[in-house]
């Protein structure tokens, strides 16, 4: 049995995507044995985000479009895992939430022009999150531990 | 006569989010809009008030893939502002960290993003374990990236958001066991790089349009120090680079574009090899002699081959340094703060020239930060190239044109996360 998996990114530097591509150096065979990577824009053009077992979500949510997208992802997955500091805590992508008035005024034209949200949110403020892989970026060992836990819960015998 | 629109939303196999909108009327390209669709994270504003000791860690977060470039350039700007001259060893370590970055980052682009275009596959994840060539290239990609990853790790602590580079030096030096491991992996990767260069050399992809190339050229091709040169013959000092750039507001894009001397231009591996191939490591020049004959080149797809050459050079330089340098424990060089402290750092990041200008107060906190990233500099050139590409192929099918556009954009290796770190533009 293989799990259908998607990897999604929002406001962030995509460092966890990079760490994931580095994890593949050593775990490609094992990962592709237990997962079909159905959605990962960095690596494929033909992506499918329907009927996922696990959705990994990286980055903070910073506008209504992203909010709608992450809600759609939530409806299409059995488990949603927030990955990396921006998704788990909002920071550092949410740093504009704490700007003083002068800085807020300075960025206001862009916030309005591109219809950003007033505050940047971690993923769990927008949808239900089943698990977290914190870190800036995530540690490969944490990723493996969390994924192994969920493989077990899904009844997959193999482990990474 | 054709009239049609092309909309490519969420371009894939590159770093970050971008959309493309093209309008063709009566067989003429009327409009090309490359929209960087990453929401801003306002790092320049966030930098203000930060102490210089923690600033490089903050600015590293602008970009996941080239974080070591942001950190290194930021440290250079701080050090220049506060009178720190890096020790010989710390300069060697900056170079090694940058070589590790180039190997890993170019490796990611060449194998994971661009190679599927060469083999006619959607994704590297679709490479077959049963087709020998695909199996080999897939596993080569892991070995090449791993060598870069290990080099970054032993020098900088981690490949992404590295903990060891600091203002005034490095917090730790590599031990002999670590150096041995890195040397083994670098030597193993070297012949694999020759193979990927050959693959891109044989790829029949061509697109040319006259443009200027700009790069920081260094005597040992270290990506870190030297003079900025352009193909129109100009030589510029690092601190003066900004005087030659003109910021262009692109209302539909979340990042500004730039012109150099009033014209569009290109930065990146192709620019560097075009302007400075003589400075490559002697072994690299020997092994890549056949490919180096192609440069200077206007063919944007040669950016891939140029990246391959740079991976080889980074490996050769790193092997040389790791085998010859004896690392010793060093204290960090302390800053000397004046009333006003201004420093400019310019380095070559994987995707091209990266510029940091910092204004620091007497307490050692940032008053002002200005960062110019490579993808923003390439933005106008990319749009013009796309316009010409569509015009050249105007009688072909829309699917064909779309596919060619994506290949072209990927050849630039754009990084939208970098481009969206800030926006200091007054909209009216």
Image: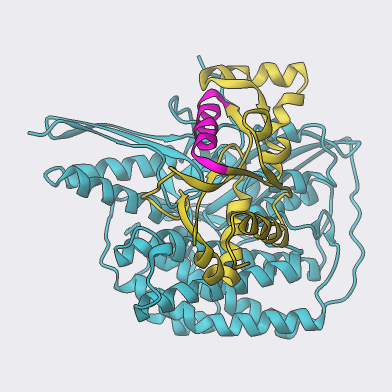
The spot of residue B253 in percent (x, y) is 46, 30
Q: Can residue B237 be seen in this view?
A: no
Residue at 36% x, 81% y is B132
Residue A4 visible in image:
yes
* Residue appearing at x 67%, y 35% in the figure: A93
Q: In this view, does B391 lie above or below B172?
A: above
Chain letter tied to cyan: B
Write the residue at 62% across / 63% down: B101
Q: In this view, does B49 lie to the left or right of A26?
A: right
Q: Quadrant of the C terminus of chain A?
A: bottom right
Above or below residue B320? Residue B19 is above
State the image coordinates of residue A157 (x, y, percent, origin top left).
Answer: 59, 66
Residue drawn 64% across and 54% down?
A153
Residue at the farthest left position: B1
- Start-end of magenta stretch: A63-78
Left or right of residue A10: residue B275: left
Q: In this view, does B24 lie above or below B183?
A: above
């Amino acid at each position: 049995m293989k799990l259908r998996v998607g990897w999604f990114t929002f406001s962030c530097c995509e460092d966890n995507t990079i760490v994931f591509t580095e994890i593949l150096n050593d775990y490609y065979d094992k990962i592709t044995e237990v997962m079909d990577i159905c959605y990962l824009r960095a690596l494929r053009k033909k992506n499918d985000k329907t009927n996922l077992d696990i959705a990994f979500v990286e980055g903070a949510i910073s506008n209504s479009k992203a909010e709608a997208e992450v809600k759609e992802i939530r409806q299409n997955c059995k488990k949603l895992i927030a990955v990396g500091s921006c998704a788990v805590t909002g920071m550092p992508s949410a740093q504009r939430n704490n700007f003083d008035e002068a800085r807020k005024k300075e960025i206001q034209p862009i916030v309005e022009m591109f219809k950003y949200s007033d505050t940047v949110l971690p993923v769990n403020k927008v949808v239900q999150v089943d698990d977290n892989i914190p870190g800036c970026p995530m540690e490969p060992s944490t990723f493996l531990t969390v994924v192994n836990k969920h493989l077990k819960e899904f009844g997959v015998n193999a482990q990474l | 006569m054709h009239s049609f629109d092309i909309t490519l939303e969420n371009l894939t196999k590159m770093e970050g989010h971008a959309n493309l909108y093209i309008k063709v009327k009566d067989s003429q390209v009327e409009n090309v809009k490359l929209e960087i669709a990453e929401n801003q994270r306002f790092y320049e504003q966030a930098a203000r008030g930060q102490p210089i000791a923690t600033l490089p860690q903050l600015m590293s977060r602008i970009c996941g893939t080239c974080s070591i470039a942001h950190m290194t350039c930021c440290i250079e700007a701080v050090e220049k502002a506060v009178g720190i001259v890096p020790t010989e060893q710390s300069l060697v370590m900056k170079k090694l960290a940058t070589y590790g970055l180039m190997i890993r980052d170019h490796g990611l682009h060449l194998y994971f993003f661009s190679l599927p275009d060469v083999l006619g596959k959607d994704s590297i994840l679709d490479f077959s374990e049963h087709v020998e060539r695909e199996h080999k290239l897939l596993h080569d990609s892991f070995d090449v990236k791993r060598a870069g990853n290990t080099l970054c790790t032993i020098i900088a602590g981690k490949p992404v958001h590295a903990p060891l580079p600091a203002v005034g030096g490095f917090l730790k030096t590599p031990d002999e066991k670590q150096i041995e491991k890195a040397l083994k992996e670098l030597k193993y990767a070297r012949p694999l790089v020759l193979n990927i260069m050959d693959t891109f050399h044989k790829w029949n992809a061509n697109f040319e349009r006259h443009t200027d190339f700009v790069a920081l050229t260094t005597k040992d091709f270290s990506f870190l120090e030297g003079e900025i040169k352009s193909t129109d013959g100009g030589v510029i000092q690092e601190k003066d680079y900004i005087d030659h750039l003109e910021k262009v507001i692109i209302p539909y894009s979340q990042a500004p574009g730039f012109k150099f001397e009033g014209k569009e231009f290109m930065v990146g591996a192709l620019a560097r090899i075009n302007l400075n191939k003589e400075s490559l490591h002697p072994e690299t020049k020997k092994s890549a002699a056949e490919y180096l004959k192609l440069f200077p080149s206007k063919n944007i797809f040669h950016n891939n081959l140029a990246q391959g050459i740079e991976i080889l050079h980074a490996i050769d330089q790193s092997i040389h340094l790791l085998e010859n340098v004896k690392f010793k424990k060093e204290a960090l060089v302390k800053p000397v703060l004046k009333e006003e402290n201004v420093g400019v750092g310019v380095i070559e990041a994987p995707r091209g020239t990266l510029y940091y200008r910092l204004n620091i107060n007497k307490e050692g906190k940032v008053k002002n930060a200005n960062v110019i990233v490579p993808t923003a500099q390439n933005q106008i050139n990319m749009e013009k190239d796309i316009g010409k590409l569509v015009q050249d192929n105007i009688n072909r099918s829309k699917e064909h044109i779309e596919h060619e556009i994506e290949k072209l954009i990927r050849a630039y290796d754009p990084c939208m996360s970098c481009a969206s770190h800030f926006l200091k533009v007054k909209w009216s």
